[in-house]
Image: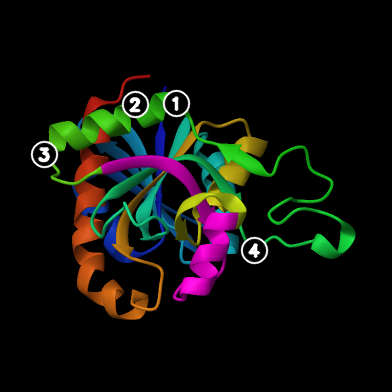
Amino acid sequence: MFVLGIIGAMDEEVARLKDMIEELQVIDRAGMSFYQGNIYGKQVVVVKCGVGKVNAAMCAQAMIDTFSVSAIINTGIAGSLDAEIEIGDIVFATDTVEHDMDVAALGYEPGMIPDTKQSIFKADSKLTEYAKTAVEKAGIDVNVFMGRVVSGDQFISSKEKKNWLVDTFGGRCAEMEGAAIGHVAALNDIPYLVVRAISDKADDSAEMDYPTFAAKAIENSINMMLQIIKEYEE
């Protein structure tokens, strides 16, 4: 049986999805509540992981171990790193990188994880195609972009850091969970996708932009996620 795992970082990102679950069961693991049941007749597990890479990684592994999910989608908001990508637009990850992994003193490039086979985590192409179709069918009037999502335990709010993320990694948006989920998914050979609605420009205006635009970005993300669930077939 195909089971879709959906992970969001904040209550606002998963509350509406949880409310729509039928035949609901709530299972607590590792300090998190996992909501299992069906939406539009599709088996889903929905959870709020909390902010940051440790919470995200712990959540993804608990979800895989407990529910044997077939695929994971991490939905949420992010800061744009590309002038072309405006607030409210949506980014689908082609891959993810942990930008705050830094072992340069030992000769590694930024983002490279020592003693591992993989430091760049490629998103699943089938999930991406469903997500693209979902945006169109949901009637979300935004631009959609593909590109690298960079993750770290930092809220990016300076032009200098933003420029570094672009120059070093070619990042298109920055957030705090996606690459950790990608890392866990890769180790478990589980297809995954990170979807981000843009809430700020990840520069000196980010602190001002975020409260104003986060709600709309979350709404876009949820509407798209519901359409993905409706359309997805194994």
Identify the mark at residue 129; answer none if there is no mark: 2
Q: Which residue is mark 4?
A: 100
Q: Which residue is mark 1?
A: 125
How far separated are the C-alphas under marks 3 and 1? 22 Å
Q: Residue at x 55, y 32 (%)?
A: 190
Residue beneath the point at 25% across and 60% down: 87
Image-quadrant location for residue 36: top left
Residue 64 to residue 174: above or below: above
The stretch of residues the image draws in magenta is 144-167
Element marked by disc 1? helix
**Rounded to the nearest whole Å, what is the CA distance between mark 3 and mark 2?**
16 Å
Residue flagged by tag 2: what amino acid is it? Glu
Q: Work out whether mark 3 precedes mark 2 in sequence or the reverse, and give the earlier one.
A: 2
Residue 62 seen in the current view: no
Q: Is residue 141 left or right of residue 3?
A: left
Magenta region includes residue 208: no
Q: Which one is nearer the viewer's eye here, 62 or 226? A: 226
Mark 3: which amino acid? Gly
Residue at 47% x, 67% y: name it. 51
**Earlier-in-chain disc, 3 versus 1:** 1
x then y, percent, for residue 101 = 69, 60
Q: Earlier in the sequence, mark 2 or mark 4?
A: 4
Judge the density around disc 4: few (<14), some (14-19), many (≥20) Cα neighbours within 10 Å.
some
- Three-letter residue code for mark 4: Asp
The alpha-carbon separation of the residues under discs 1 and 4 comes to 26 Å
Dot 2, crowdedness within 10 Å: few (<14), some or many (≥20)? Answer: few
**Disc nearer the start of the sequence (3/4):** 4
- Kindly identify which residue carries mark 3: 139
